[in-house]
Image (cartoon, coloured by chain):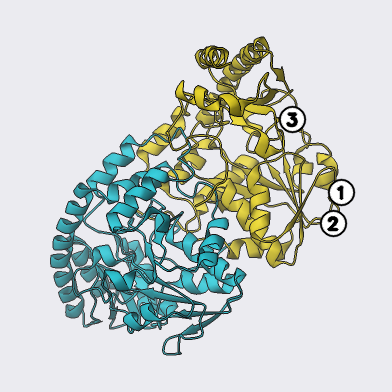
Chain colours: A cyan, B yellow
Amino acid sequence: MSTVLHGGPDASGVASHDFSTNGNAVGSCPAVLSALRAADAAHYPDPHYTALRSRLAAFHGVTAERIVIAASASEFIHRISAAVAQGGGRQVWLPAHSYGDYERAAQAWALQTIRSPQAYTDAALRWCCEPSSPMGQPQANLRQQAASTNGACVLDLAYEPLRLEGQASLDATQRDRVWQLWTPNKAMGLTGIRAAYAIAPEDADASLVQRIERLAPSWPLGTHGVAMLEAWTGEEAQRWLAQSRQTLKDWKTRQRAVCESLGWQCLPSDANFFCARSDRPYPDVAAALRTEGIKLRDCTSFDLPGHVRLGVLPPASQQALKQAWTSAS
Amino acid sequence: MSTVLHGGPDASGVASHDFSTNGNAVGSCPAVLSALRAADAAHYPDPHYTALRSRLAAFHGVTAERIVIAASASEFIHRISAAVAQGGGRQVWLPAHSYGDYERAAQAWALQTIRSPQAYTDAALRWCCEPSSPMGQPQANLRQQAASTNGACVLDLAYEPLRLEGQASLDATQRDRVWQLWTPNKAMGLTGIRAAYAIAPEDADASLVQRIERLAPSWPLGTHGVAMLEAWTGEEAQRWLAQSRQTLKDWKTRQRAVCESLGWQCLPSDANFFCARSDRPYPDVAAALRTEGIKLRDCTSFDLPGHVRLGVLPPASQQALKQAWTSAS
């Protein structure tokens, strides 16, 4: 039984005010919900996902050959780590703080992990994420990373569709040099749907691409995953997403003010979540908060002890947090 | 781009009379459909699937620790193959004819494959399937396989819930000695849902189990996969399944008669599908049949050239096959 720590539902179910995940708190995208309702799960999907790959390729302005369908971001993280290990890679470079699955997959394949500020030059696989997790900040040196020809560089773009501030560090040409990993379920407010895709670099190492394909399970996506990814590329979903970013921006300003009123130090963030150093350690009050339906993400597993990460939630949830924290303290 | 051959939808979509897959042709199980409609995909599933694992364990009368959740049968096939390779395994044993993913996963991990009638005694991983695919027959020597302590033995039970004739070779005690792989989406008539689970043997090699867990992606199942697996264990779904087997039995008798009327030789089968040697090679008429909405599964990739596999479909589809085959010949 795995003991990996994740945000989101736990054995007690879904918390009423779940600040621990980074999904779009405005709700589930109506265009995707209607695609899900129309989805017919009676048949296998096309095992080659021909129509879906064309659609994703057109959305990103790349050729369909570059689209790699994945069961989830985590599945792709494991798969490319395995493919790098198979190719004789030994070292994986990670940002100073990052999503635990990068390291977990590296360890599962006995790859040595090194972290920033250690140099990335010898790594066979480099993980970048912008806006980063857990901080929601730009990735330092991302342009140099993208320009480097040593090893494979993956840019995890899970939070780019939920960017509320700042600018991406890479332009389209620079992005074409890295593996892009897209996971629209957070932006679409549907984290219960497992589906992701990667876009291979324009000059991808052909043997690495081949290994990644050989390691793919058959039909990585089910009907509902296909429906979400198709709807995600549509105008209706993208318009809804743009509107939801406006709402989240407003909620974020209020939420930071609530945290500051509790005496917390909020760190800067470009995304729909941010980290804060709370006035007392979260683990001491986590159980009391959970009974009030409130869950935060402790940042110890991100190597940021004393900090919590908070997804931006509606003002009512923010008030619930303020009250519960004040009573628990 | 993968060139693996699978039954089911192709680039032209879903065939009207698709004999090429083995899903339950009676339709989609109403209890699962209603669970799917009620599923709320707005949240991550519990990453440990605690409730689901308990439910599956109770259904099978085993402890919850033995349940391994998988994104799909294919994902488990790749994962256990990788885990065996990591443990120093070198050889994988396969039945004379079998599902292509067993071999494909072995090749992806540079494991040598040997096939029956070669001896299985030195293999680190052995694949069994009963009722078998593509023939729907008992697996030869299954009792000896289950009793053998050399390497890991996986029994693929994808078609057991759709068994229309015969008896399983193993009793419950014998089954407890092998890895059981369950994929209810075929029986539930919902092959568009990706979800599966394995039951570890009672005396499973602890280091193999640990490697299998370490290689698991986070949240292998989405909301819809969880909903299907939960509903599958319920009385309503099991009652519907038992009724649908009665219908399929009747259809199967008629379908074999239709094939024989075309001059085909039908092979024996215990399942909701069977193989037949057609009076002329299927590849010669496949394109003409496909334009009439008819698709069969050529058995060349199963090492059975000259044969087709047919899932049992309703009488109207059988008549459509008869007409189209007669006009094409």
Give the residue type that dot 1 points to: Ala
Quadrant housing residue A132: bottom left
- Secondary element under disc 3, as helix, strand or loop, is loop
Mark sitting earlier along the chain (3/1): 1
Using the rendered image, report if marks 2 and 3 lie on a common chain.
Answer: yes
Residue B119 tag number: 1
Give the residue type that dot 3 points to: Gln
Category of crowding for the residue at label 1, using alpha-carbon neighbours closer than 10 angstroms: few (below 14), some (14–19), many (at least 20): few
In the foreground, A154 or A23: A154
Please name the residue shown 82% across and 36% down the image.
B140
Category of crowding for the residue at label 2, using alpha-carbon neighbours closer than 10 angstroms: few (below 14), some (14–19), many (at least 20): some
Mark sitting earlier along the chain (2/3): 2
Residue annotated with mark 3:
B137
Residue annotated with mark 2:
B122
Residue B64 visible in the current orientation: no
Mark 2 to mark 3: distance in Å?
25 Å
Mark 1 falls within which chain? Answer: B
Please name the residue shown 24% across and 53% down the image.
A27
Q: Is residue A282 placed above or below B285 in the rendered structure? A: below
Q: Nearer the viewer, mark 3 or mark 1?
A: 1
**Looking at the image, do the residues carrying marks 1 and 2 touch, with CB atoms under 8 Å apart?**
yes
